[in-house]
Image (cartoon, coloured by chain):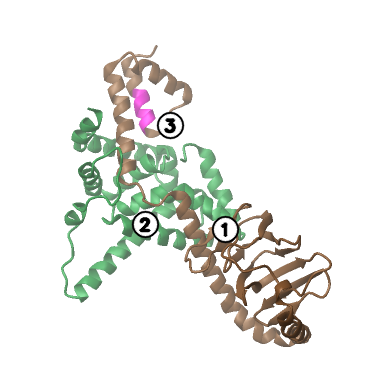
Chain colours: A green, B brown
Amino acid sequence: MADDHKDILDDEMLIREALSGEIAAFGAIVERYWNMVVALAMSKAADPSEAEDIAQDSFLKAYSHLHNLKDRSRFAGWLAKIAMQECSNTVRRAIRSKAALGGRVTDRDVLDAIPARWSNPGLSGSQIQLIRRMLRQMPAKLRKIIIMRFVAGLSSVQIAEQLGKRPGTVRVWLHRAYNILRKDLAPVIEEIES
Amino acid sequence: MITCEQCRELIEQYIEGVISDTQLDELKAHAETCDACREGFERFNLMQNAIREAFSSETSAAEARETLLGRISEQAVRHVREIGAGQSRVGWGRIAVAASILLVVGLAIGFAVGRADSSKRGVALAAEVPIQVGNLEGTVLVRHAGMDVWDILKPGSVIRLGDKFHSTARSGFALELDDKSTIELNQNSMLVLKSYNGETQFFLEHGECTASLESPHGPFFIDTPNGRVEALGTEFTVTVE
C-alpha cells in the first residue's frame, strides 16, 4: 500500500531504473498498482476477466510510453488515466463488433447480475454485485478517488498530487463520495456488522 | 482524552489518510469508550474492506507482475530479433571468418566424434535435468517448454529440458552442470536447453555466454543460429549478434 510520501518518491526511482532497462523495477510498479488498475477497470467494465485484460494492456501501454511521462511524481494519476482510456477503447470496440454482427449490446445491469466468478469469504455474491453497481453509478471523478484512496491506499494529499488537483478539492470530493457510499451501502454494511 | 468533536475531526483525517500515528492512538482510545465514535471509525474500515473485496482481482499482484514481465520481455525479444535481422546482413562479412572456422571445427568434431561417443557429449535427457542455478544477478526469466508464461528464475529453480532463459539488462546467471562445469549467460541474452538424441543441447539464440569446463572434458558444444561451436580448451565465450 502506498500510505506515505516515500512510495511516491519510490515511484520516481523505479521509473528511472525501468527506463534504464531494469525491467524488474517496472515489475515492482506493477505489483504496487495492480489492484488499483484492476479496480478502476472493473469500475467501468463489468466483466472481471475483461477488467484484468484491460489492466494488463494498461501496464503494457504505460511501459511502452514511460519515456513520454513528463512528471514522474504523478505516475499513478497517469496510469489511472491510461486505464480509463483503455476501458473506453475496449467498450467501444465491443459495441462496434457486436453492432457489426447484428447482435444486441448487453446492458451493464445485466452483466452486473452475473455472479462473481470466485468466492469471497467476507461478502456474498449479491453484496458484491450491489457494491459494484453503486460505485459504477457514481460520477467518474468520485469513483476514481474512492479507488485511489480505498484500494491503492493513497491519501487525499497524494491523490491531489497525482491528479494535479488542489488538496482541498480532493478532500471535498472524497467526503462527498464517502457520504454517498455510506448512504447507498448502508444495508450491506449493516449486514456485515450483524 | 479527546472530545467527541475532536474525535470526529480525527475520523475525517483517518478517512483522508492523513492521520498521524499519535492521533490514531488517541482516536482508538476514545472510540473504546464512545459507541457513536466507534461506529463512525469502524464503519469506514468495513466500507474500505468491502470495496477492496468487491473490486479485488482474481490474479494476485505478484502473479500479474510475472505475467507482465514475461510479456514485456517477449516484446523486447521480438524487437531485438527485428533489429538483429537487419544488422546481421550488414555485419555478416565481419563475423564470417570466425563463424566459418567455428562451423568447420564444430561440424567435423560434432558429427564424427560426437556421434561415436555421444554419451559424454552433454547432460542426460530427462524432464528435469541435473543442472543448478548459480551466480544469479538481476532479473533472469525462464519459460518452460510448451508454456506461455515467463517466470522469474530463482536460485533453487528446477531446470527442465526445453527451458528457455532470457537475461535482461544488467542481469546474468550460471548454469552449473553436474560435472562442475558452468555456462554463464551474460545480460540481454537468450539460451535454450534443447533435446538432441536424448541429450541436452545448449542453443544460444542471441547474446553472449561463457562456458567453463572441467578438465578433462568430453566433446562439448554450444549451438547458435550461425553454427555449432565446440570447446577445444576449458573456457570459451560465444557471442551471437
Residue at the disc numbered 1:
A23
Q: What element carries label 3?
A: loop
Which amino acid is tagged 2? Answer: Glu
**Label 3 crowd bin: few (<14), some (14–19), many (20+), radius 10 Å:** some
Which x, y percent locates residue B157? 59, 55
Which x, y percent locates residue A69? 50, 58
**Magenta-highlighted residues:** B9-15
Is residue B162 found left or right of A142 in the rendered image?
A: right
The reply to whether label 2 and label 1 mark residues of one chain is yes
User: What residue is shown at x 57% (from left), y 55% (from top)?
Assistant: A24
Which x, y percent locates residue B103? 74, 85
Residue A67: quarter of image = bottom right
Q: Which residue occupies the foreground of this view, A9 or A147?
A: A147
Which of discs 3 and 2 lies nearer the camera? The answer is 2
Q: Is residue A75 visible?
A: no
Which amino acid is tagged 1? Answer: Ile
Please state, as top left, top right, bottom left or bottom right, where the C terminus of chain A lies in the image. top left
Q: Is mark 2 on a helix, strand or loop?
A: helix
Which amino acid is tagged 3? Answer: Val
Residue at the disc numbered 2:
A52
Query: How far is mark 3 from mark 1, CA to CA?
Result: 32 Å
What is the chain letter for disc 1? A
User: Which of the labelled discs sits on residue B18, or is there none?
Assistant: 3
